[in-house]
Image: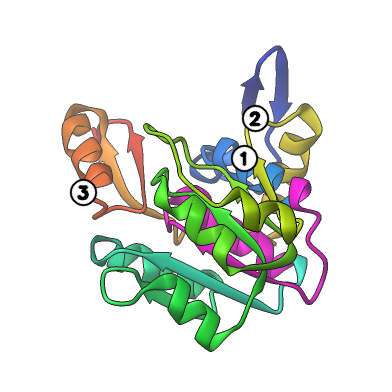
């Protein structure tokens, strides 16, 4: 099987299934975020948002040697947060029950990184509040409205707010290599396999967060 990105065609390794290969693109986004962060072994991070990119980021952080990983989500994300724990998150926070800023600072102190994958503007400010001096907030989520945060804290504590978007050919090659080696496990993230004829159902499952990731499959004969 071949995958095409822009004008480049990639050969999928023989031990990587079609379903696994289907998640190469979101994995590439997550890997781009990790690359831009420059995280080192033993550093700490929070991942805001347990969608597919957030869950893949957790796996990559674990593989990169992060010493503590915190995942946040809402009550609707219950299934996704269970997967986040399975993927390597050390602490799970339901932001509808706990204030994520207060809870993280009390339990873990200031972190080295926050990976924002929610698309909810207030998480930008929350992320900046919990990273230490020189810390970085990596923004992957696509936000529909403007975010508000304190530039004084950003400047005086030399924090960084970094946008994560796109990837290159080498990133895709590395993603396929990670899949082939078994370093990244896709199966737990694919919670629903829906025939094309039930496409509306698949989108509803993703929208209401019942599903972590939906894959459309051919009709059964």
Most extreme residue toward the top is 7
| Figure check: 144 above or below 119 | above
Residue under numbered circle 1: 29
Q: In this view, does 193 lie to the left or right of 2?
A: left
Q: Is residue 208 left or right of residue 26?
A: left
Residue under numbered circle 3: 208
Residue under numbered circle 2: 166
Instruction: Specify start and end residues of the magenta stretch as a single range.
Output: 35-63
Q: How far apart are marks 1 and 2 (CA)?
A: 6 Å
| Figure check: 136 above or below 27 | below
Q: What element carries label 2?
A: loop
Q: Where is residue 112 in the image (x, y as percent from the top left)?
A: 71, 68
Q: Is residue 187 magenta?
A: no
Q: Pick the quarter of the image with the N terminus.
A: top right
Q: In this orientation, which residue lies closer to the viewer: 213 or 99?
A: 99
Q: What element carries label 1?
A: helix
Q: Position of residue 66 (x, y in %)?
A: 71, 72
Q: Pick the quarter of the image with the C terminus.
A: top left
Q: Is residue 131 left or right of residue 94?
A: right
Q: Which of marks 1 and 2 is nearer the N terminus?
A: 1
Rate crowding at label 3 as few (under 14), some (14 to 19) or many (20 or more) other CA atoms within 10 Å.
Answer: few
Residue contact between numbered discs 1 and 2, judged by CB atoms under 8 Å: yes
Q: Which residue is drawn at 61% across and 82% down?
A: 109
* Residue 162 occupies quadrant: top right
| Figure check: 9 above or below 194 | above
Q: What element carries label 3?
A: loop
Q: In this orientation, which residue lies closer to the viewer: 214 or 16?
A: 214
Q: Which residue is drawn at 52% across and 37% down?
A: 22
């Amino acid at each position: 099987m071949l995958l095409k990105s822009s004008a480049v065609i990639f050969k999928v390794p023989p031990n990587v299934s079609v379903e696994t290969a289907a998640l190469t693109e979101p994995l590439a986004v997550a890997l781009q975020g990790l690359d831009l962060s420059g995280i080192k072994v033993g550093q700490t991070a929070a991942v805001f948002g347990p969608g597919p990119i957030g869950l893949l980021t957790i796996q990559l952080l674990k593989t990169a040697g992060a010493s503590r990983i915190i995942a946040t989500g809402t009550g609707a994300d219950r299934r996704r947060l269970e997967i986040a724990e399975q993927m390597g998150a050390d602490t799970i926070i339901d932001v509808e029950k706990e204030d994520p800023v207060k809870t993280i600072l009390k339990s873990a102190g200031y972190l080295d990184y926050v990976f924002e994958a929610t698309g909810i503007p207030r998480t930008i400010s929350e992320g900046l509040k919990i990273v230490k001096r020189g810390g970085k907030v990596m923004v992957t989520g696509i936000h529909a409205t403007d975010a508000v945060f304190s530039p004084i804290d950003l400047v005086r504590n030399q924090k960084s707010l970094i946008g994560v978007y796109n990837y290159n050919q080498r990133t895709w090659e590395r993603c396929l290599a990670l899949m082939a080696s078994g370093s990244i496990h896709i199966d737990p993230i694919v919670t629903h396999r829906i025939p094309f004829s039930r496409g509306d159902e698949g989108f509803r499952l993703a929208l209401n967060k019942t599903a972590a990731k939906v894959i459309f499959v051919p009709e059964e004969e």
